[in-house]
Amino acid sequence: MLALLDALRRRVDPDDHESLEVPEWTSPWTLGGLFAGVAYGWATDTDWHGVRTNKRRRILLMALQNTGRRLVFGDREADQQAFGLGQLAGFVLYRLRYGVLGGLPGDDRADSGETGG
């Protein structure tokens, strides 16, 4: 998210209000980012291959993700921003569904309506 905000900040010229380029929700990369955000939330919640409990694996996952984004997008900042916007939206929607409005995936207590204690 910070990278997206930094990219937007760098694109803004205080004297030229036309220079602000807002990522488009209609870009196919936004949809791809949405799925990536949901997948990352699911992978950390379910501890897929130990990405939540093992710091090295989590760092490796993030490094692979960033490398993949650079290989796919290159210098196309508009596509990078659209993907990042979708990824943020996907993770926020996932967290709202699993964690705020309902239990985490695989949490039997949340599925059966039981409470702790």
Image (cartoon, rainbow, N blue to C red):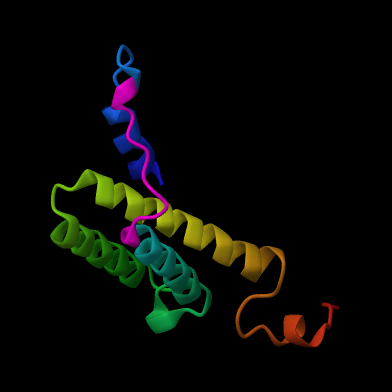
Residue extending furthest toward the top:
15
On the picture, is 71 further left or further right than 79?
left
Among all residues in the image, which is located at the extreme front?
26
Q: Is residue 81 magenta?
A: no
Which picture quadrant has residue 65? bottom left
Please indicate whether residue 116 sits to the left or right of residue 68 in the image: right
Q: How many marks?
A: 0
- Can residue 79 be seen in the rendering of this structure? yes
* Percent position of residue 114, x then y: 83, 83
The magenta-colored residue range is: 18-29
Q: Which of the 4 quarters of the picture holds residue 17?
A: top left
Q: Mark yes or no: residue 52 visible.
A: no
Residue that appears at 27% across and 29% down: 10
Query: Quick check: 5 above or below 84?
Result: above
Q: x and y percent of residue 45 in the render?
A: 53, 74
Q: At x 39% / y 67%, what residue is drawn?
A: 36
Q: Which of the two residues, 49 or 110, is positioned nearer the viewer here?
A: 110
Specify whether 49 is left or right of 113: left
Q: Main secondary structure of the magenta part?
A: loop
- The relative height of residue 77 versus residue 52 in the rendered view (above or below) is above
Whole-percent x, y for residue 4 in the image: 35, 43
Question: Residue 66: where, in percent of width, then height?
Answer: 24, 59
Q: Quadrant of the C terminus?
A: bottom right
| Nearer to me, 109 or 92 | 92
